[in-house]
């Protein structure tokens, strides 16, 4: 596009080529696949390009698994924030091109306005048919130029809208990936930390209540060692589902780490938070774990939960440590129970 840096145009062209290759090979349009193909078409990573070409030479096409393996090998060091930055820059480039097109269109329209003004002045003093004809032809020509340029602008704006929509989908997917635990679908530790900081800031501003639960699956390591990691993963997903389904929309359920979960309860005092925790303990204990495929009964799992609430001037770390201390006390007291700050 005239007037735009070559780098901007090239960046968008690379994005379009990467998306086209994803479609051509019938691959999932996830951020990982997009990162591989963007690096491939942009000659950013020669080793990655050789791997892609090697698979294509052997198999004629690539599967999602091939792309995943190539990404793990060549792009595993690419941080999620870097991915966000790349796609964000591409969105910015596309917007700049649109601005450039609009500015160019304004320039064309200004030129036509000048031509029409000149023609109108000539028309005011025109007295013969040939002069009149030449003026009309000039006006028609100028009008036709505007129509053609507007049609081009309309087509390019439509293409840019589609491109921006696809890039926005990638941004959404990358952001979700950055904030979500892949096994359980819950918020991950990064998301939890950010949300707890926000919840504390809001509670301080409004002098409102805020409570925190930290829960741990009892004897999870023993269950894992006995039944295997696949069934251990099944238990983690079961607990995640129960916690999510039995808390409010404004609450945040997160996988805190390993077999630990955390629940942020805005606008919730300590007594209500204890009630929530006891209900969750009861619901988990009532669910029996079945082995998928065989239906074999593997017993029940239980939770120990520590409950803490916000004190004036308390930091996020202090609130976490208070809930964690209560969780430790629940474990020490025999597990499958709730302990709050009021119990210590």
Image (cartoon, grey):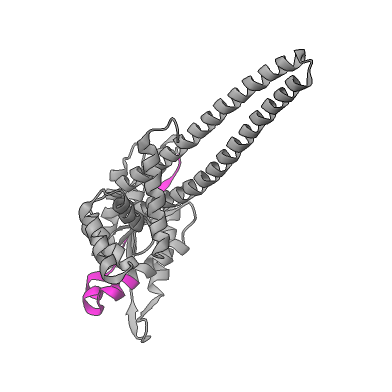
130 vs 320: above or below: above
Instruction: Give whichever of 93, 341 is nearer the camera.
Output: 93
The residue lying at 45 percent from left, 41 percent from top is 208
Question: Is 230 on the left or on the right of 120, as rendered?
Answer: left
Residue 93 drawn in magenta? no
Q: Position of residue 223 (x, y in %)?
A: 25, 75
How many numbered marks, from 0 up?
Answer: 0
Residue 217 drawn in magenta? yes
The residue lying at 35 percent from left, 86 percent from top is 296
Q: Is the N terminus in the top left, top right, bottom left or bottom right quadrant?
A: top left
Instruction: Give whichever of 187, 312 is nearer the camera.
Output: 187
Instruction: Give whichever of 121, 300 is nearer the camera.
Output: 121
Can residue 11 be seen here? The reply is: yes
Q: Is the C terminus in the top left, top right, bottom left or bottom right quadrant?
A: bottom left
Q: Position of residue 104 (x, y in %)?
A: 52, 30
Q: Position of residue 41 (x, y in %)?
A: 32, 52
Residue sticking out furthest to the top = 125
Quarter of the image where one finds residue 60: bottom left
Instruction: Give whichever of 227, 68 is nearer the camera.
Output: 68
Quarter of the image where one finds residue 238: bottom left
Highlighted magenta segment, given as a residue range: 208-234
Question: Is 151 on the left or on the right of 251, as rendered?
Answer: right
The residue lying at 21 percent from left, 59 percent from top is 73
Quarter of the image where one finds residue 173: bottom left
Q: Position of residue 99 (x, y in %)?
A: 49, 33
221 vs 6: above or below: below
Can residue 329 be seen here? The reply is: no
The residue lying at 27 percent from left, 61 percent from top is 52
């Amino acid at each position: 596009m005239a007037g735009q840096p070559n780098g901007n145009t090239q960046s968008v062209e690379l994005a379009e080529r990467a998306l086209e290759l994803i479609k051509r090979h019938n691959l999932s349009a996830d951020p990982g696949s997009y990162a591989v193909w963007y690096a491939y078409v942009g000659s950013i990573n020669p080793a990655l390009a050789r791997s892609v070409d090697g698979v294509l030479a052997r198999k004629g096409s690539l599967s999602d698994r091939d792309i995943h393996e190539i990404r793990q090998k060549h792009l595993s060091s690419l941080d999620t924030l870097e991915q966000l930055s790349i796609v964000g820059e591409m969105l910015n480039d596309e917007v700049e091109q649109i601005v450039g097109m609009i500015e160019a269109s304004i320039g064309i329209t200004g030129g036509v306005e000048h031509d029409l003004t000149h023609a109108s002045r000539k028309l005011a003093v025109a007295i013969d048919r040939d002069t009149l004809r030449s003026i009309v032809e000039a006006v028609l020509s100028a009008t036709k130029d505007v129509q053609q340029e507007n049609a081009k602008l309309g087509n390019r704006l439509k293409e840019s809208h589609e491109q921006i929509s696809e890039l926005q989908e990638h941004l959404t997917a990358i952001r979700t990936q950055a904030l979500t635990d892949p096994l359980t679908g819950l918020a991950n530790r990064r998301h939890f930390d950010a949300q707890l900081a926000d919840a504390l800031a809001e509670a301080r501003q409004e002098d409102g209540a805020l409570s925190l639960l930290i829960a741990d699956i009892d004897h999870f390591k023993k269950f894992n060692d006995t039944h295997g990691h696949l069934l251990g993963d099944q238990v983690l997903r079961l607990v995640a589902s129960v916690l999510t389904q039995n808390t409010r929309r404004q609450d945040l359920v997160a996988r805190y780490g390993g077999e630990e979960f955390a629940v942020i309860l805005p606008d919730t005092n300590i007594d209500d938070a204890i009630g929530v925790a006891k209900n969750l303990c009861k619901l988990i204990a009532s669910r029996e774990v079945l082995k998928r495929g065989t239906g074999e009964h593997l017993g029940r799992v239980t939770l120990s939960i520590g409950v803490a609430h916000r004190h004036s001037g308390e930091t996020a770390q202090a609130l976490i440590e208070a809930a964690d201390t209560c969780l430790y006390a629940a474990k020490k007291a025999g597990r499958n129970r709730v302990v709050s700050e009021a119990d210590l």
